[in-house]
Amino acid sequence: MLRVRSEISNAVVGQDAAVSGLLVALLSGGHVLLEGVPGVAKTLLVRSFSRALGLDTARIQFTPDLMPGDVTGSLIYDARTAEFEFRPGPVFTNILLADEINRTPPKTQSALLEAMAERQVSADGVTRPLPGPFLVAATQNPIEHEGTYVLPEAQQDRFLLKLTVTVPERDAEVTLLRRHADGFDPLSLDVVQAVTDAATVEAAQRAAASVQADDDVLAYVVDLARATRQSPSVQLGVSPRATTALLAAAKAWAWLSGSPAITPDHVQTMLVPAWRHRIRLRPDAELEGVSIDSVLAAVVQQTRVPI
């Protein structure tokens, strides 16, 4: 996976945390919601990621007039056979880039629910499995509200991680500008080469899943979850599904770090990206300017760490 990072860095500068998050989600068999202002290379990051992995990829530009069949596929009448034939949609791929997912109505957003949760698409009474590995990387802009539809809690809960893609530091931005001055073409991505394949990725997923978890660390995850439910600033804390998501992310991070078992440090590292989109604050806390990330940081500080 170090070679994957290296290849991505040939195209994307200053987004190491987002790259790590994508690798964790892929190894965990989860999905990623990328949030950031326009122009911080969210789309380029996902395209470079899939190219370095040597996986098939497809991109959907979510718009208000997009229909569910445009995502999953639809039945097409074949005049030659006088029968309907299923034409697979772009979701039948390894890495699906759902660009600006919050610009399409909930009806179309929900077309991804079955694919994300069960890795399959049901149409006309037939269930069709999706290829493996499968990852949805969805992007959204946090500052635009006109013409957008907020993702329902059930939809957000399908994402393993929510990553914040920020503006790069000054030195990284200078490096980025130098590359463009030297002729870098973000459309061709000739600088990114495939260094692995689907079989290798699936083997890495199995290895990450085999990372050990001691009972005291599992109890620590549960204590963190219960602390979110008891926080005075929180209206809705994380669910048991969130604890399993954090466990999977911590296992993947431990494997990437070369550790045979997860530790509290691995749990703490993945807690914010795994839980920031699964918590609802109380209205009065939002009015006071309390952020979900600050609430989670307080939960980590106040929860006893197993020795």
Image (cartoon, rainbow, N blue to C red):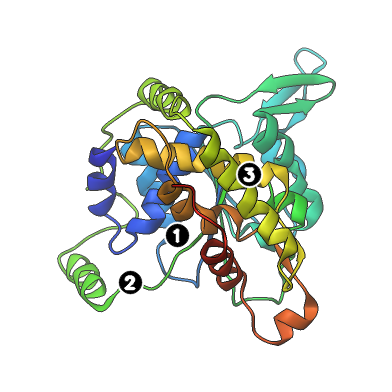
Image quadrant assignment for residue 230: bottom right
Please give the name of the residue rendered at 24% of the width and 68% of the height, measured from the top-left corner: 176
Please give the name of the residue rendered at 37% of the width and 57% of the height, measured from the top-left corner: 17
Amino acid type at image mark 3: Thr
**Residue carrying label 2:** 168
Q: Which of the two labelled residues, at mark 3 and mark 2, occupies the earlier sequence position?
A: 2
**Residue carrying label 1:** 42
Q: In what element is the residue under mark 1?
A: helix
Q: Residue furthest bottom?
A: 288
Q: Can you say which quadrant of the picture contains the N terminus?
A: top left
Amino acid type at image mark 2: Pro
Residue 243, disc: 3
Please give the name of the residue rendered at 69% of the width and 21% of the height, measured from the top-left corner: 128
Dot 2: within a 10 Å radius of its alpha carbon, few (fewer than 14), some, or many (20 or more) residues? some
Dot 1: within a 10 Å radius of its alpha carbon, few (fewer than 14), some, or many (20 or more) residues? many
Residue placed most toward the observer, 119 or 244 = 244
In front of the other: label 3 or label 2? 3
Dot 3: within a 10 Å radius of its alpha carbon, few (fewer than 14), some, or many (20 or more) residues? many
In front of the other: label 2 or label 1? 2
Residue 38: % across, % down: 49, 71
How far, Cα to Cα, is label 3 from label 2? Answer: 31 Å
Callout 1 touching callout 3 (CB < 8 Å): no
Q: Which of the two labelled residues, at mark 1 and mark 3, occupies the earlier sequence position?
A: 1
